[in-house]
């Protein structure tokens, strides 16, 4: 068997990575602003505010020089309306549900770590991607906002994994930074709320073009039972990776999406 390192744990950012939530973020943000008597923000303005958590979003969305207590009221309005709102404009990016299902079929451990507030994370995953993740976390008292690595390290521990076996996927430079601070592999996606070049500049270890099986294939050498024990080897079977890779950094990297009992082959 190949001794090349492999991943069996995948943790995902939410907004801009696996779910396109921006249309609903615009609606909820403008409703919170309206309730406080503030003017609306455009789609592009809200996009520029996304990525550092709800408080940062609303502090930028309210007019300049708004007193902190009033801005905090807008944050509270946003949370309340988001929990009441049906998020009907939010949808997974192409091939996300089947990619996650395929990773689960291969025995991978899956989690979510987002700067979105915790209640919003659980609500939208239950609505759009139910039953696909083992651990889900958003920003809360116990989970600090990225790029603080404490939340990612806790998620990895709760999944029963280690940073060396973990890839964190996201669409912002902070996602790559938090992965590296935690000792995990940082995978940047090219379709989110930051440009592919921004993600390369952030030193993404791997850049993904899409969630779609293409090109690189894996040969299954052994399988594992539900407790993770190797059941033995059989006839090699080739399966496509569920990622289309754009680029990988120069240093040798683990092969993505393949549990440790698998070898990575071209």
Image (spheres, grey):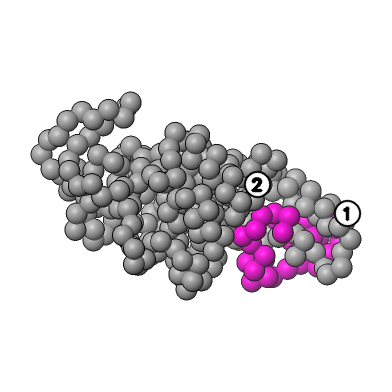
Q: Residue furthest bottom?
A: 197
Q: Residue furthest top?
A: 227
Secondary structure of residue under mark 1: helix
Q: Main secondary structure of the magenta part?
A: helix
Q: Residue at position x 83%, y 69% from top?
A: 64
Quadrant showing the C terminus: bottom left
Q: Residue at position x 50%, y 34% from top?
A: 158
Q: Residue at position x 71%, y 60% from top?
A: 57
Quadrant showing the N terminus: top left
112 or 230, nearer to the observer = 230
Q: Position of residue 192 (x, y in %)?
A: 51, 63
Q: Which mark is residue 195?
A: none
Task: State the count of labels.
Answer: 2
Secondary structure of residue under mark 2: loop
Which region is colored magenta?
28-56
Tell me which corner region of the image, top left, top right, bottom left or bottom right, holds residue 37: bottom right
Q: Position of residue 203 (x, y in %)?
A: 46, 66
Q: Decide if residue 208 is in sight here.
A: no
Q: Is residue 149 above or below residue 176?
A: above
| Residue located beneath label 2 in the image | 144
27 or 222, nearer to the observer = 222
Q: Position of residue 120 (x, y in %)?
A: 64, 45
Q: Is residue 102 above or below residue 60?
A: above
Give whichever of discs 2 and 1 has the lower sequence position.
1
Q: Decide if residue 251 is in sight here.
A: yes
Residue 149 is a magenta residue: no
Q: Which mark is residue 69?
A: 1
Label 2 Cα crowd, 10 Å radius (few <14 / some 14-19 / many 20+): some
Separation of disc 2 and disc 1 at Cα? 21 Å
2 or 1: mark nearer the eye: 2
């Amino acid at each position: 068997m190949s001794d090349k390192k492999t991943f069996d744990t995948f943790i995902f950012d939410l907004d801009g990575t696996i779910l396109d939530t921006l249309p609903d973020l615009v609606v909820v943000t403008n409703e919170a602003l309206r309730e406080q008597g503030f003017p609306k923000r455009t789609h592009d303005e809200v996009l520029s505010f996304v990525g550092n958590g709800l408080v940062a979003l609303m502090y930028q969305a309210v007019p300049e020089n708004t007193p902190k207590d009033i801005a905090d009221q807008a944050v509270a309005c946003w949370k309340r309306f988001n929990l009441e709102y049906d998020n009907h404009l939010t949808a997974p990016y192409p091939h996300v549900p089947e990619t996650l299902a395929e990773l689960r079929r291969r025995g991978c451990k899956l989690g979510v770590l987002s700067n979105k507030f915790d209640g919003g994370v659980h609500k939208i995953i239950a609505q759009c991607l139910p039953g696909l993740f083992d651990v889900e976390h958003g920003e809360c008292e116990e989970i600090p906002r990225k790029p603080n690595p404490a939340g990612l390290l806790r998620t990895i521990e709760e999944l029963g994994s280690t940073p060396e076996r973990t890839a964190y996927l996201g669409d912002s430079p902070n996602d790559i930074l938090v992965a590296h601070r935690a000792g995990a592999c940082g995978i940047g996606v090219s379709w989110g709320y930051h440009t592919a070049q921004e993600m390369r500049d952030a030193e993404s270890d791997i850049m993904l073009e899409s969630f779609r099986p293409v090109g690189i294939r894996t040969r299954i050498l052994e399988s594992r039972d539900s407790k993770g024990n190797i059941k033995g080897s059989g006839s090699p079977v080739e399966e496509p990776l569920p990622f289309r890779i754009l680029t990988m950094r120069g240093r040798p990297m683990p092969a993505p999406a393949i549990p440790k009992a698998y070898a990575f082959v071209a």
